[in-house]
Image (tube, grey):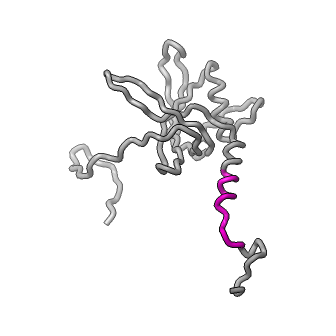
Amino acid sequence: MTMQERELNWDDTIERDGGGEYVLLTPGDYNFTVTKFERARFQGSQNLPPCNQAKLEITIHSPEHGDVVVFHNLFLHTKTEGLLSAFFTAIGQKKKGEPLRMNWNAVVGAKGRCQIEHYKYTKDGREYVNNQIKRFYPYDEYLKYVQQSSAQHQPPFPTAQQGGWQQGQF
């Protein structure tokens, strides 16, 4: 019997042991789907003043590990306009050399292709490594990859539409 997913109360009893291990992807190129978008405010840093921030959850589709979520932030500032353009070009909203009014309502569910790298950092004296999006590829590269992949996975037998096999032939 499968348990129904539900919200837990503060004093509920829990039974299941910890979730799965963190999946460190092999650096390389992957297809992705944007699965969550949240508006936030960046408080500023030494390199970037306070500005609006888009917090994204991007599901990376890995042939080896299945779907893996990567968190990615976009900062809405003129200093990072090129990064915003790269993202919107990757999901097919922006054309190179053309201005774009960012349509955040169309971001969730958008698909594209990106390059994943490992990001190493130290926190509280411990070293960590996580998956990070290094770059977004233009949407036409994603489409080209999808077309090539589907061509490689064509059925091994001719179909009726191809004129090779007819029902009742064998």
Quadrant where the image shows the C terminus: bottom right
In this view, 1 is above or below 137: below
Image coordinates of residue 115 in percent, x first then y, are 58, 37
- Identified at 42% across, 42% down, the residue is 23
Along the viewing direction, whichever of 11 and 138 lies nearer the viewer? 138
- Identified at 33% across, 25% down, the residue is 126
Report the label total. Answer: 0
- Identified at 26% across, 49% down, the residue is 17
Left or right for 75, reference 16? right
Residue at the top extreme, as displayed: 46
Image coordinates of residue 113 in percent, x first then y, are 62, 42
Image coordinates of residue 62 in percent, x first then y, are 52, 48
Left or right for 157, reference 115? right
Left or right for 163, reference 5? right
Left or right for 110, reference 45? right
Residue 155 is covered by the magenta coloring? yes
Along the viewing direction, whichever of 52 and 118 lies nearer the viewer? 118
- Quadrant of the rendered structure where residue 158 is? bottom right
Q: Which residues are magenta?
A: 146-158
Residue 51 is covered by the magenta coloring? no
Quadrant where the image shows the N terminus: bottom left
Image coordinates of residue 82 in percent, x first then y, are 66, 25
- Identified at 54% across, 36% down, the residue is 116
In this view, 108 is above or below 48: below
